[in-house]
Image (cartoon, rainbow, N blue to C red):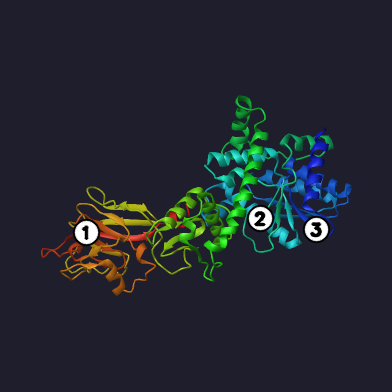
Amino acid sequence: MSAISRVHFKARDSARRLGLGEGDAVVVGVSGGPDSTCLLDVLEEVRGRHGLDFAICAAHLIHDFRGKEKYDDAQFVRDLCERRGLELTVDEVDVEAYQRDNGVSSFEQAARDLRYGFLGRVATTVGARFVAVAHTADDLAETVLLHMARGSGIHGLRGMDEVGAWPYPIGQDAPRLWRPLLGVRRADTVGYCTEQGIGYRDDSTNYMEDFARNRVRMNLMPALAESLNPRVVDALGRLARTSSIQLDFLEACAEEQWGTVAPEPPAPDGVLRLRRAKLAHLHPALQALVLRRAWISASGDSKRLTEGHIRQMALIASGNASGRSVILPGGYVAQANGNWLGIFPGDAADDCPYPVSFGEFRLTMPWGPIAVAVTKRGGWEVAAQSVKLRAGETLDTGDAMRTYLSASALAAGAIVRTWRPGDRIQPLGMSGHRKLQDLFTDRRVPREWRSRVPLVVTPAGVAWAVGVQIADWAAVKRSPDGATEAVLVEFRLDPAHAAGE
């Protein structure tokens, strides 16, 4: 069978399964490469030959760093669509600026975000129910392999579906993502273009080994085919299909449990609450799916949540302690409080000045030749500076997150951690100690904040409840002779942590 026949049959059958017909519009993402050029041509063929009267709207995004080459690609797509009388939308975006503004470290991920954002906008504008992209069986195999290498769960093994939900939140009228060529090989799309006499563009970035997918395609897949299984693409495709079937069943089971675990939709402030007891009694497989669904319900996003995030949420949900939290992608937080596990935007539940952190870390001190020591952990950037206070110089820094502590009080070192039941402090000016819990109440520290207040703790006890109170024994005692040794400690939010790096 020729490449034309293989591609045509697969695309035709896929279009029929989709139920395309009169009044439907399909946005086709066209880069100008052989896969997308083949896709555009075969959809035109299928539409004309089989009476599937749907409209085709092409879309091309200029979004990489190749200089003139990327504009030549855009002109190629313009010419291609003009000859066929097809509607075309072209836009240009700056991927590197998007990375900087949104804290996205991967160029590939940033480009994907922008590409799907563009295709979604085009679909909304033209009223298309479907967006067709040119992923092939090779793309599916590479995706599964990448997900396996990254330790993905069953969602990663699923890889791609022929028809799936839109991968980014764009509202209730989001289009469906359609992959008509998922059953054909990349060699078939090249063969199709050659046999049809259709030109296409060859993207030079496809040969850059800076990108993980290129390394998989050029190095790993050929090595697996040669050393293990010549039909490794087919094998990984079968794995994806099996995983998809099993996942469909598990998701149906999770759907049955959803109403008992999450009795209400997200509140107006964005907080979604889950019953911890109900969640803890689910089988781990269903627990993970319910937590993933909760994340999507709260954030509207199905991406960036990892198996590690899910494990951490399950851990704090099943424990006995309240106040434990997990930082999630996009500035979201999961926090266990009483009988509930809440998932919410970091700024939704309150205006707490403290990041949601957990664990503890040692504070680097400015001893010896180091005048200023900076520690970055748990969402904090803590600066400790050795200073000499002149006689009469005020100890009031004017900032609750910045204070002077006695150098001798910190001489044995200090850690930073959060409140534990039974913690006590000797408030400034007092001889006795008080429970921190009572001090928080007196100082009107909101209950939701208390598990997030960092404490500077030495072997002698709590030296400073940051932003609340320093201990009398750790306070600077003025020297009657003039200059006094002290340490100026300042807590600030870590910019890298806030950006999600």
Classify mark 3: residues with Cα within 10 Å, few (<14), some (14-19) or many (20+): some
Q: Is residue 208 visible?
A: no
Say the numbered circle drawn on residue 166.
Answer: 2
Label 3 to label 2: alpha-carbon separation = 17 Å
Amino acid at the residue labelled 2: Trp
- Name the side, left or right, on which 383 lies relative to 194: left
- Name the side, left or right, on which 98 lies relative to 15: left
Q: Is residue 155 visible?
A: yes
- Name the side, left or right, on which 240 lies relative to 335: right
Find residue 31 and report its horizontal and vertical position in percent: 71, 46
Q: Earlier in the sequence, mark 1 or mark 3?
A: 3
The residue singled out by tag 3 in the image is: 24
Amino acid at the residue labelled 3: Asp
Label 2 to label 1: alpha-carbon separation = 53 Å
Q: Nearer the viewer, residue 291 or 92?
A: 291
Residue at horizontal 18%, vertical 69%? 392
